[in-house]
Amino acid sequence: MFQILRISSGWIMGEMQDDSLKHFFDYSYINDFVNDLMLALIYAHGDLTDDGPKNTFVAHREPATDIWELECENDSLHVVIKSYKDFESKKLETVKEFHFDYFEFLNSFLEAMTCILKKYGLLGYRESWSYEFPVSLYLKLIDIYNSSNDMKFHIVSEEDNLGAEAVKTDIQLEMKILESRLKS
């Protein structure tokens, strides 16, 4: 369904395939493709609603551009990729529509991200891709996939945080989840 084939010198190459269609991509570092796709998957599932819609994002092939749109309804994921000749002209070249079971796609995506972490590591990923690996989004997607809701937020009181209330998660639990995922 989804795989990353290579990351090098600010380029990320991969492919996505459903039962009838395949999309090969080779995106530049102009936008953080992995982070944007993770946000879109979380938002499309309904687990992120702050700061406006994040289910649409741009990925650059230089000079060409793809616009990804993700929608999820009843665990059915619909992905539309609109390819433009270049970002400025907005001349539409192709439209590809993919249909997946949300959780099957998410499993494939998480496996691809786990392979990336094993292959490159966190620092190697940053050096190769020019962006930090979005660990917190990765953890949230694991939580969604497992339907566990383990990533609970807890309140840090104003008294314990110099007069400003904040939220926290359990770092020990997060590290256990990462360790478990990377062992598999």
Image (spheres, helix red, strand yellow):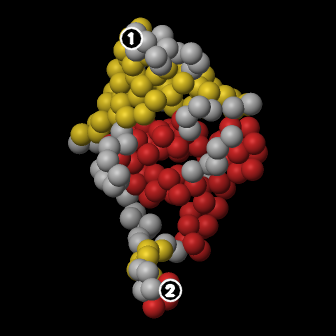
Residue with the mark numbered 1 = 92
Residue 17 in the image: above or below residue 40:
above
Residue 124 in the image: state x and y as whole percent: 76, 45
Of the residues under marks 1 and 2, which one precedes in the sequence?
Answer: 1
Relative depth, front residue between 37 and 181: 37
Residue type, mark 2 in image: Leu
| Residue at screen point 73% across, 38% down | 128
Mark 1 Cα-neighbour bin, 10 Å: few <14, some 14–19, many ≥20: some
Residue extending furthest toward the bottom: 159
Residue at 39% over, 48% down: 42
Say left or right for 150 vs 11. Answer: left
Q: Where is residue 27 shown, x and y percent of the image?
A: 59, 25
Q: Specify the quadrant of the image occupied by residue 126.
A: top right
In this picture, residue 11 sits left or right of residue 33: right
Farthest residue, direction left: 74
Q: Where residue 54 sits in the image (x, y, percent)?
A: 37, 42
Determine whether label 1 and label 2 are within 8 Å by CB: no
The answer, for residue 18, to whether it is visible in the render is: no
* Mark 2 neighbour class, 10 Å CA radius: few under 14, some 14 to 19, many 20 or more: few
Cα distance, mark 1 to mark 2? 52 Å
| Residue 117 drawn above or below residue 94 | below
Q: Secondary structure at mark 1?
A: strand
Q: Of residues 161 and 100, which is closer to you in this image? A: 161
**Identity of the residue drawn at 35% across and 24% down:** 80
Q: Secondary structure at mark 2?
A: loop
Q: Residue 81 lies in what quarter of the image?
A: top left
Residue type beneath disc 1:
Leu
For label 2, the residue is 162
Foreground mark, 1 or 2, reads 2
Q: Is residue 118 above or below residue 69?
A: below
* Residue positioned 58% across, 55% down in the render: 135
